[in-house]
Amino acid sequence: MKNKFPKQMKNEALFPCFFFLLLFSSPTHAQHADSVTIIDSRHYSNVFGETRNYRIFLPPGYFDNPLKKYPVIYFLHGWSQRYFGDGAEGQWSADKGNQNNGDNIANFVSRHEVIVVKSDGYNRGPGEKYYVRPYNIAPVETFRQFPIYFPEFIHYIDTHYRTLADREHRAISGLSMGGFMTFWIGGKYPDLFCAAGNFCGSTELEVGPKNLPVEYRHIDMYKNYAGMNVRLNYGNRDFIRSYHQDLNRIWLQVMDNYECKIYDADHSSCGLGEMFGFFLKTFANPPIRPLRWDHIDVYPEFSVWDYHVSSDRDVPGFTVLENVDKRGFRCIVRKFVPDGEIIPFVDLSVTTAAVYEKNQLYVINDVDLKSSKAMQQNTLSDNSGRLRISLNGNAHEIGVNKITDKPNICIAAFVSQQFKLKI
């Protein structure tokens, strides 16, 4: 089978094949399936401190026009699989040929101008016994945090292949445990993806840092997907379909940007072509960035929509941001969501996006909703137009105004009292 390697990749195919294997260089295996170039490759991850594998599907004509760029669909494999796609007895494979009854990645890429990338969720080190549970979830056993790694992986793909390197031309998808990861990573990074598509994924699993694991339920995270199109495919014989039905009871009522389709299928990548078509339609008409957004995150430190949150939280929990825009936000840290116990002893720092005037004095109005105490302080924006706001884990309503602005008027809390009407 003829090998073909992208010109822009390091360690190009100028040496014999054995030299690539010895050096652990970029492309280690390539093949053509219906004019699609499939490359198995690897890169070094600074996040993990190790080499990670991936498989990439390049469309017909990729090597003919060095100026043309393509949208990208990321695909996360499921339990017992790896980047090369082979699961237990190969029953879940959907890469090429007749796999998945022909409704597979290579066949889709052969007919559309799109790149598909499969990451590797393997969660063991060299020399360790093969392990079928990917992504370090359910249970959390190692240091690897795949959501933290994913932006680095995207950057690698964008700098080594001709991609349209923006959120409007990037989607994420996955099967089974990879489907769970799709909704988790997609909801964590709505600023990186315009669409997320889940094939038969679990709706709740244990995730998070090794010493801070939490039960993560997608049903509670629907607000994380503002600015995205979201879809779930599952089969009417899927052994976990009851979880999908529970999710639909909520998401279909509260999300205008969510859709679901049920197939005559088992636990599989059912409707793969339709899902990828859903992505292409989204690329053609991507959702705009929301003017106001909400976000829930399991990590003590995270970034989203160019805001950065850091904290000293050393217990399991969730940081919740609500109604975030230029005029302020609400912030709270809970043991679980939606209504878990507040964790007040956490110190947080919220650095805003660069949406303010540079080196300008602003008034920060902080209402602690638990104590009903209000505090006001002046803060100077930095040279890029960002503000840094410090608070604790209690429920805080934050208002941001210039010195000359009129204050925001909002209801922080209310009390209902009953009155007897005398006649």
Image: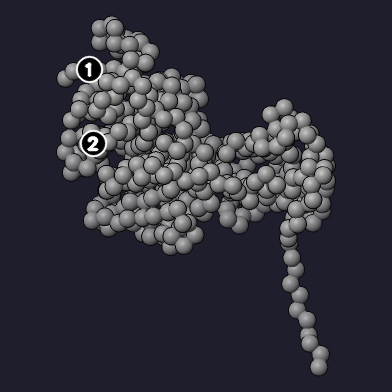
Q: CA distance from mark 1 to mark 2?
A: 21 Å
Q: As drawn, is 208 to the left or to the right of 345?
A: left
Location of residue 25 (image quadrant): top left
Kind of residue indicated by mark 1? Asn
Tell me how many marks there are. Answer: 2
Is the residue 302 above or below the residue 365 in the image? above
Point out which mark residue 252 bears: none
Query: Mark 1: which secondary structure?
Result: loop
Residue toward you, 130 or 3: 3
| Mark 1 lies on residue | 3
Residue toward you, 372 or 134: 372
- Visible residue check, residue 178: no
Mark whose residue sits in front, 1 or 2: 2
Location of residue 279 (image quadrant): top left
Residue 318 lies, in percent from the top left, at 60, 46
Task: Identify which residue is drawn at 26% across, 25% down.
Answer: 61
10 Å crowding of disc 1: few (<14), some (14-19), many (20+): some
Residue toward you, 366 or 161: 161
| Mark 2 lies on residue | 111
Residue 50 lies, in percent from the top left, at 44, 20
Residue 66 lies, in percent from the top left, at 33, 19
Task: Identify which residue is drawn at 73% across, 60% down.
Answer: 411
Q: As drawn, is 191 to the left or to the right of 386?
A: left
Residues under numbered marks 1 and 2 in contact, where contact means CB atoms less than 8 Å apart = no
Kind of residue indicated by mark 2? Arg
